Amino acid sequence: MKTLLVSHGDLDGISPAIIAQYYKIPIDTYWFKDYDFLEDPNFNQSMLVYDRIYITDLSIQDETYKILEENNKEFYVFDHHEQTRNFETKKNVFFNLEKSGTEIFFEELTGKKRISSIAREFVTLVGIYDLWKLEHPLREKAEKLNKLTYELLNYRVNGYGRYQNFIERQLTKLQTNKTFEFTPFELSKIHNAEIKEKNAVISADKILQLRKDSHGKGFGITKSNRKISYLCSKLLEKYEGMDYIVCINTYNISEGKISVRSLEPFSVLDLQDVDGHKCAGGGFRDVNFISKLWSGEINELGYENE
């Protein structure tokens, strides 16, 4: 039986692969996707070569669910994005807005199994970061785990190989240690990440544009090719009256990728073509649109259903 795990390419999406391997769940192939996976015309059909499919930390569409069901595939969805609420009553869909995708997968996978304290701690850290629990006493440690994730990715390769170093290092810790701690090597990587973060904030702040949208909400727009979640958070803290911030990702400008972060109570999901969570989302736009947005020819992203 060929088995696929398809997930998001962030900490919360990568971690189910670690948990699956820790509990020796047989999986043949791992796919890690970004928000643009829904625009891939081959996505649904590509999954049909697999007999069992785990979908974690990704919100699927009606068409995907229908195709998998019609082809009698054994599939399971573990997600916490608002869009998945439409499927929460369907068979094998595990949905909870209050937990991370990793936590949902972990709890359904382990059931009544004996759970090691280190596995529980790792999963908890993922949830603290992904659900943006800023006041949690373990928030700093969770942020370090997220920083480490991106420092260990190999951007020169695609597919599982990009994430393999991070996955294998964390898996080894779960298998050999009693508590979750960072190694000296990992701490050096985290330190490097923190230096990059500070520089990214300075650079993004220098070119930040402050605007008002058609609903009277204050927002900022900037550009960066790295540390986008961190710099958005820091700039939101700095500028009073900024309800949300849009960051154009320049790592591969031809992708047209944007990230959006906000302060409560504003929901970025109200903005056009933005997916993710209430205060942290993103999406992809036409490169021409991105260019006009930056120049000011287009003022804002726009709102859904307008």
Image: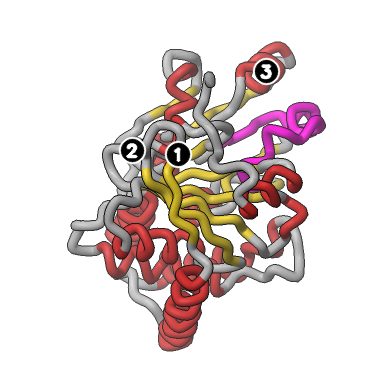
* Identity, as a three-letter code, of the amino acid under mark 3: Glu
Q: Is residue 100 left or right of residue 134?
A: right
Local SS, label 2: loop
Percent x, y of residue 183: 41, 82
In front here: 75 or 141?
Answer: 141
| Mark 2 or 3, nearer chain start | 3
Dot 2: within a 10 Å radius of its alpha carbon, few (fewer than 14), some, or many (20 or more) residues?
some
Dot in front, 1 or 3: 1
Count of picture labels: 3
The residue pinned by badge 3 equals 63
In which quadrant of the rendered view does residue 201 lie?
Answer: bottom left
**Segment tinted magenta in the rendering:** 30-55
User: What number is the disc on residue 213?
Assistant: 1
User: What number is the disc on residue 266?
Assistant: 2
Dot in front, 1 or 2: 1
Percent x, y of residue 236: 35, 58
Taking the spot 53% from the left edge, 33% from the top edge, the residue there is 302
Local SS, label 1: loop
Dot 1: within a 10 Å radius of its alpha carbon, few (fewer than 14), some, or many (20 or more) residues?
some
Local SS, label 3: helix
* Identity, as a three-letter code, of the amino acid under mark 2: Phe
